[in-house]
Every structure is written in structure tokens, then in C-alpha cells.
Amino acid sequence: SIVVLTFFSGCLSTAPILFYDAVVKNGYELHFFLFRITPESFMNSSRTFVGQALTGTSGILSASVAVTVVSFVLVGVIEEWSKHWVTRKSDPAYFSSINDVIQLSIIAAIGFAFAENVVNPNYFLAFVKNFLVSTASPDWGMFLGSVFGRSIITNMVHITCSGVLGYFYGLAFFAKPALEDDRAHGRRHLFILFLHRFTGASRIQLYR
């Protein structure tokens, strides 16, 4: 069914962020004509930011803030675009309401989170190695706490973000019937009407 396909497609949509993690881990640089980009690990930049905040090194702190924010935004964009791409490529015949779009977005997010936790060597595999295998005695408390944090809290973040994005994509997908319903009930979108008259663009496209 489309739900199962969306789940496994969400699993496969981890490829871009796993590629980014591999680039960061191996220290590769992206060279362009006039500049170069050195991808930074969000976890490492966050640790640097917290450490410098505690020691009070203000000069370096401002730079670490910028690196942390940029890496956070970049990782977020990669992950949300990947999950949203799965929803956009789903069968549009399945969508009968905005709720359907939201639900499918959430299914893609669950698949993404599941694959990320299992495949990414920094998460579940690292928890097993650090807390159960490499220690003199298994630390089940730290292991279960780490697994809980990744499997529950992080999943909720993925579900929330994808649900919000799915809602607005659903609004765009059903723009025409939504505008017709608003018009039938006497509701007017003055800003859209202004842009329509100013640019000549379709009201449906502006609504989207």
C-alpha cells in the first residue's frame, strides 16, 4: 500500500543527510569557483559552543555561534527537504483532504527517523558499543536513556516538523477548492487579491 511504500521511501530519504555526515566525518571540502565550503558537524559545533560559553571566551564564542546556527539550519533543511520530497512524489490520487497529506508526511518522517537511528553509526550502533560492549560492565541505564532519547524525543521532533510542513503543503495542494470555499462563504484574501491585481499571477498560485 501507499503507506508502506511511503515508510520505506522515508527510510531511503536518509541518503542526503548520511552523505553529509560522511563528508563531515572524512573532512572533505566543497570547492567552488570563488569560494569553498567546509561542512561542520552540528554535534561538534554545539559542543564547542557550550564549552566556550562556559569558559567565557567571547571572541571565539561569536564564531562558534555562527557555525552552530549555520550547521543547524543546513542539517534541518537537508532532512526536511528529503522527507518532503517523498510526500510530494506520492500518488496525488491518495490525497482527499489536508489530513491525508499530513498523515503521509508523518509516515515519511517515521521511516526517516527509523532508518537514521539504525544506519547512522553515531546513534544506535554507537550506543551498543559505548554502553554495552566497550565497558567493563554493561551500563543499561545510559543505554536505555540514549535509546529513549533517540527513539522517542527525536522522533517527535521529526513528526512535528514534517506534520507542519505537510499541513502547508496540503493547503497548497488543495488551493483551488479552498479558495472556492472561502469565496462561497464570503471570505476574501485581501493580500492575495492585491498581488493578483499587481502582478497578474493566478490566485491559486499566489495562495500556494
Image: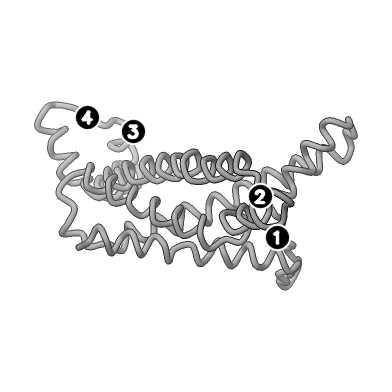
Disc number lying in front (3 or 2): 2
Among numbered discs 1 and 4, the one appearing first in the sequence: 1
Amino acid beneath label 3: Phe
Per the rendering, the mark at residue 39 is 1
Residue at 82%, 37% (x, y): give it.
51
Among numbered discs 1 and 2, the one appearing first in the sequence: 1
**Quadrant of the frame with the N terminus:** bottom left
Disc number lying in front (4 or 2): 2
Provide residue 107's location: percent of width, then percent of height. Answer: 32, 51
Per the rendering, the mark at residue 191 is 3
- Residue under circle 2? 131
Determine the image quadrant of residue 17.
Answer: bottom right
Q: Please indicate whether residue 158 sits to the left or right of residue 147 in the image.
A: left
- Residue under circle 4? 188
Amino acid beneath label 4: Arg
Q: CA distance from mark 3 to mark 2?
A: 56 Å
Residue at 15%, 43% (x, y): give it.
177
1 and 3 marks in contact (CB < 8 Å)? no
SS category of the residue bearing label 1: loop
Q: Please indicate whether residue 132 sits to the left or right of residue 45 in the image.
A: left
> Which residue lies most toward the top here?
186
Figure label count? 4
Disc number lying in front (1 or 2): 2
Decide: is 111 above or below 193. Answer: below
Q: CA distance from mark 3 to mark 4?
A: 9 Å
Q: Please indicate whether residue 62 sits to the left or right of residue 207 in the image.
A: right
